[in-house]
Image: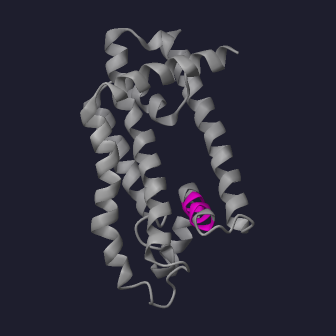
Amino acid sequence: MKLLRDTWLVFGRYFWIFIHNPAWVVIGVVQPLLYLLLFAPLLKKIQSAPGFPRGGAYNVFVPGLLVQLGLFGAAGVGFSLIAELRMGVVERLLTASVAYAVALWTRSENSYAPIIFTATLPILLLSGVLLPLSFAPQWLRNIAAANPLSYAVDAARAVFLAHLSDPSVIKGVAIMAVLCLISILIGARAFGRAVA
């Protein structure tokens, strides 16, 4: 019950901050639309190329875009945590995340930003979010196979095409569930150390 209560407190606080800042609401809506309008048409030219995943350019790009937004959203939470540390609010925000653990470790936006952005770009590119990995050379596909986010992208694309029984959906959900559990444990441990 305490976990649910704490989660609700954190959600309520950040949702209130989000809806009372119109700039973030606008950016949250406009940014994905800009990606869709500016990048997806580039894929239309190559969708007939051998190796391009089935379903057309938008069915390949939009699920990847959703995963990308999730990745950037999760990576960005540490910035608000660093501010919360300065204001002494952390004791009430006992939730779990790898980004929170890194923020608690660095305690500085100047250190946090390069770590997160250096890590998220390779993870993003090696997930096949922007371009399908079927176009990549074999050595790059081998590296991408170690990236859990690539399985989430494959699962999202299968779901987007209404192929719910595709094995990639089960595999992607299972891998993301394990990754989520590990992230929660890492974040909870970091919070425990930070407020102890």
Q: Can residue 126 be seen in this view?
A: no
Identified at 50% across, 61% down, the residue is 63
In the depicted structure, whether residue 144 falls above or below residue 108:
below
Asked if residue 100 lies left or right of residue 8, the reply is left
Identified at 62% across, 63% down, the residue is 159
- Exactly how many numbered labels are in the figure? 0
Relative depth, front residue between 158 and 133: 158
Relative depth, front residue between 43 and 97: 43
Would you say the magenta stretch is mainly helix, strand or loop? Answer: helix
Q: Position of residue 109 (x, y in %)?
A: 28, 30
In the depicted structure, whether residue 62 falls above or below residue 32:
below
Identified at 60% across, 69% down, the residue is 161
Q: Where is residue 64 in the image (x, y as percent from the top left)?
A: 47, 62
Q: Can residue 26 be seen in this view?
A: yes
In the depicted structure, whether residue 157 falls above or below residue 24:
below
Find the magenta span and give its range: 150-158
Identified at 36% across, 17% down, the residue is 84
Quadrant assignment, res 192: top right
The color scheme shown is one colour
Q: Position of residue 142 (x, y in %)?
A: 56, 71
In the depicted structure, whether residue 16 falls above or below residue 91:
below
Asked if residue 161 lies left or right of residue 76, the reply is right
Is residue 181 covered in magenta? no
Relative depth, front residue between 93 and 105: 93
Is residue 153 covered in magenta? yes
Indicate the quadrant containing the N terminus: top left, top right, bottom left or bottom right: top right
Q: Position of residue 160 (x, y in %)?
A: 57, 64
Relative depth, front residue between 192 and 174: 174
